[in-house]
Amino acid sequence: MGRPAVRSVKRKTPKEEKSPTNKECPLKPSLYHSFTSLEMGALRKHLLAWYDKSKRDLPWRTLANTEPDVNRRSYAVWVSEVMLQQTQVATVIDYYNKWMKTWPTLQDLAQASLEEVNEKWSGLGYYSRGRRLHEGAKKVVLELKGQMPRSAEELQKLLPGVGRYTAGAVASISYGQVTGVVDGNVIRVLCRLRCIGADSSTPAVSDRLWELANELVDSERPGDFNQAMMELGATVCTPKKPQCTDCPLQSLCRAYKKAEMESASAANKLLKGKPNLKAEIRDIEECDAPGSCALCLPSSDPWDIALGVANFPRKPAKKASRMERTVTCVCRRLGEDGEPEYLLLQRPSSGLLAGMWEFPSMLLEKDHAEKDRRHVMCRRLQEVTGHVVSLKEIQYAGEVVHIFSHIHQTYVVYFLSLCHRKADISVKEEEGEGPATRWVTKKQFQASAVSTAMKKVFKLCENKMPDSSNTSRKRKRDTADLPPPGGRIKTEPEKQTSIQMFFKPAAKK
């Protein structure tokens, strides 16, 4: 990238590095799962040549290669790496461009409010990432005199939310520090190259993967090498349908050779041919400690011929998500200009979706019946607005399911129109009375720091609301179209009242 490489960390040899896996896999040091010096040289050469030719044009790469100011450069890389955690590149690009346009420097971000940060992050998910970036920027400005930490070790030590991977990525790309990185893409590539089939989340496998990454990283182009490894995993060595014929490392891939061998062996059995076909496959090696190696496929989960190279890496079964049900209500009134407004509450400053805005909601501790859910919602609305809300006023809209990283959340959605009430409907705003509240228009809602789940809830209700696009209508005309407060609507047993029926226009005289 035209910058001198930082040599703040000497690459360790296998003997110098801690290698707990060697005791469990009695090779020196597990040659089957390692690289020779010749293989390392060939891997760096082939991978970097492929990267130079095939890399995607991404905005953070452009900034990393063109920004002369080291603090701006490392900040730009830091933002991209945090955004890319658990999020696809195609989704991140637009968010990244808007973020960097709004806050091009650490100082700009440090001066922003958490509310502004949440608004920019809205829809990107894993919202604590944005808060940690904000906290980190303030710390760099206020405590580190505006100077970003200059090594992976210091980045991890000093910046909130920066772990080993993010620190290594920022240090290698921004400063040229010779240090490897291990993310999901790199795990997949390394496990296939060296037939590492054990659970990649175990300490033994994780430690070995970091050792391999640090051994392999190119000393002249560490940042490009790390990006190339990630790029290969994202575009070629993909989880389910790897493009092995396009892979620049195919000749070095033991998983590819093993897949060829197993396929040929299976075909041979069908044809009742030579039983020793395995010996005829060139360059095939096996681990010297089958059954006891901490890195090999476990005997309880053997090779699946249908998966081929996708046998690696094997992941543990996902922990079941916690099932939760939340009752929520889209509460609408008419603003001073006759435009519909919607009530939002701010969530607590810690925990899930901290500081974000949402419709009045209440977590259901148990599986309530329909009438009980309405009671819960009415009590919540009364707490927030200070006005008594009857069961008849809230209308059932449906359910919205949203999957968080560890929670399977079902929102039981209701709709409340306050358009027939006085125009000065407000909310409790006394200090200490509860969460912050505000009324917003549809446009303001879309720009607010609301979660994707709340956007789904709003969309569900919007599809069931009467057309409110004509904001020039007089409030008197709006309210004339609604049934009187407490008006009864006949419904069929075991069937929810349609919200369209609730807003059925009055018959013309």
Image (cartoon, rainbow, N blue to C red):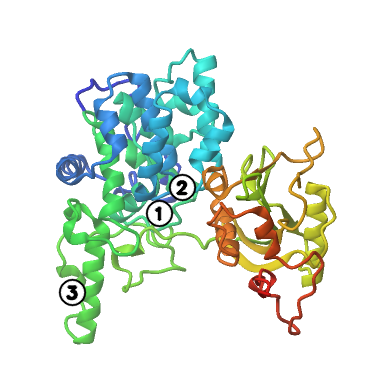
Q: Could you tell me if residue 12 is visible in this image?
A: no
| Residue occupying the point 29% across, 30% down | 63
Query: Which residue is label 2 attached to?
Result: 204
| Closest to the observer, 369 or 50 | 369
At a point 83% along the width and 51% down the height, the residue shown is 387
Tell me, yes or no, whether the two marked residues, 1 and 3, touch with CB atoms within 8 Å.
no
Crowding near pointer 3: few (<14 within 10 Å), some, many (20+)?
some
Task: Give the residue at x 50% y 17%.
Answer: 141
**Camera-nearest residue between 338 and 356:** 338
**Where does residue 84 sit, x and y in percent of width and height?**
40, 43
| First along the sequence among labels 3 and 2 | 2
Say left or right for 46 vs 222. Answer: left
* Residue wearing tag 1: 295
Which amino acid type is marked by label 1?
Answer: Leu
Mark 2 surroundings: few (<14), some (14-19) or many (≥20) residues within 10 A:
some
Kind of residue sitting beneath label 2: Ala
Label at residue 277: 3
- Cα distance between the residues tagged 1 and 2: 8 Å
- The type of residue carrying mark 3 is Leu
Q: Residue 313 location, x and y as percent?
A: 38, 58
Identify the mark nearer the N-term, 1 or 2: 2
Q: Mark 1 or 3, which is nearer the eye?
A: 1
